[in-house]
Amino acid sequence: MVNKAGSTAYDNKLGDAFTDKLQKPWLLVLTIGLGTLLNPLNSSMISVALTRLQFEFELTFADASWLISIFYLASAVGQPVMGKLSDMFGAKRLFMVGLVLVAVSCLLAPFSPNFIFLLGCRALQAIGSSTLFPSGMSMVRTSISKNQAKALAILSIFANVSAAFGPSVGGFLIAAWDWPSIFMINFPFIVLSFFLAIFVLPENRGGVFRLKRIDLIGITIFIGTVIAIILFLLSIEQNVNWWALMVFVVGAILFYLYETRRTEPFIDFDALKKDPTVTFIYVQFMTINLVYYCYFFGLPTFLQQARGYSEEHTGLIMLALAGFSVIVSPLAGGMIDKYGSKLPMFIGALLLLIGTALIITYHQTSPIFWLLIIMAILGMSNGFNNISAQTALYEHVSAENTGSASGLFQTSRYLGAILSSSLLGVTFNDFVDVVHLHLVVIICLVFCLLIVFLSWKLPGKMIR
């Protein structure tokens, strides 16, 4: 006869042992990393899918560009809001809710009856995946005291690698199983992260729910203002929507006035005014991303529609952009440790300018080898720019303001990506060819000169 009490105690010990085994720092980082990679992965895979989705839903490129804009707009709003909700309801709970939201969006997207429904799925996907980063960072900071910097660096690798290789992954998936596969590929990461989260992530009840901490009015004005400027920019080539420009101007003024009166604003303008150097870093990083994402999203469309490459071959070609970005990042990190952030930031700005200028030399008859060289230079610029801009920010903000500064840093990235999609929507809307690619490049050259100037003016010495 089995002793039930003894059996229960034995089972509890096994369960405790299993849980203790799972609650290791590297498993915590793995669990969070599998979740946090979903946002950059899904923001980048869409670059190769735009052409296929244009034909599927009978869209212009300007229409299809909303798939990029809506994702980054929802991410820009979602990350700071979800960070506060994570403090209120508990990081583990919000992390798992985020995984569920991504799962729902990815399940519904392949069955989208129309483009509007697909846009809604992209927005939900962005909100869900934006929940994972702030809640994950919160758990790392509270649960890992030893080698915390190393843990954060590993999570950064998850995000950077998934973003860099997203177009290549997306290209292979679409070539094999069509565009719904870029949504279905999320499920292995979601399921594994969710299962591990049950056992691995630390329990925390969170704080008190205070709706006043969420700047709902400010967020609403921000969303309306950004949508207005997108609508205006996309209309420049044909019938200009002057009303959208007016809405943008009025919305921007209202947003500024309202935010300066908030105790917990969505964007802290008072802090930006107090430190012009940090503000310029945000402006520079937004401009860097505007230029870089013009190539990140524009080149896959150009390769497919102007050069006739398949999604699979386009994904392979995009490896030049991604691969050199990843390879150069450790070199940039070493330079920062030795010389500070100004020198590698200036190098990154020059590489972006050189790569942009070289695209002018690329023509319809140019060999693909020459385009690969140009993409490698642009990839190296991204490797330098990302890490040096982030380091420059932390060099000029106090420790207590690191969290809010990081949030605005990501917002500047998202705004740059949104503006790049609008620029591509205008230039690629009617024709995707070398002439229109060069038009994008000429516009980007102006921004590149601004980036070089801001890098040169950054406080500090090139070599210390």
Image (cartoon, rainbow, N blue to C red):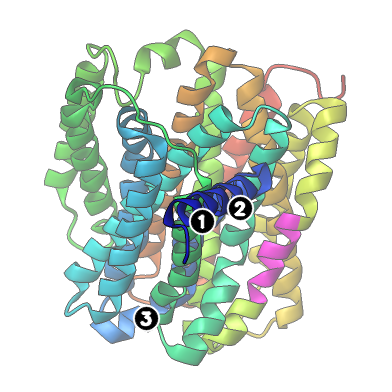
Is residue 380 covered in magenta? no
Residue sitting at 71 percent across and 56 percent down?
Answer: 325
Which numbered disc flags the more N-terminal residue, 2 or 3? 2
Seen as rendered, the residue at the extreme top is: 274
Camera-nearest label, 1 or 2: 1
Which quarter of the picture shows residue 24? top right
Residue sitting at 67 percent across and 47 percent down?
Answer: 26
Do the residues bearing badges 2 and 3 touch, measured as CB atoms within 8 Å? Answer: no
Which numbered disc flags the more N-terminal residue, 1 or 3? 3
Do the residues bearing badges 1 and 2 touch, measured as CB atoms within 8 Å? Answer: yes
Magenta stretch: dominant secondary structure: helix
| Residue assigned mark 2 | 30
> In what element is the residue under mark 2?
helix
- Give the percent coordinates (x, y) of residue 247: 14, 38
| Residue assigned mark 3 | 180
Q: In the displayed structure, does residue 125 sit left or right of residue 46?
A: left
Q: Name which residue type carries label 2.
A: Leu
- Give the percent coordinates (x, y) of residue 39: 45, 55
Sort mark 2 into few (<14), some (14-19) or many (20+) by Cα contacts within 10 Å: many
In this view, the residue in front, 9 or 391, is: 9
Which quarter of the picture shows residue 141? top right
> In what element is the residue under mark 3?
loop
| Residue assigned mark 1 | 196
Which numbered disc flags the more N-terminal residue, 1 or 2? 2
Q: Report the number of discs.
A: 3
Numbered range of the magenta stretch: 317-326
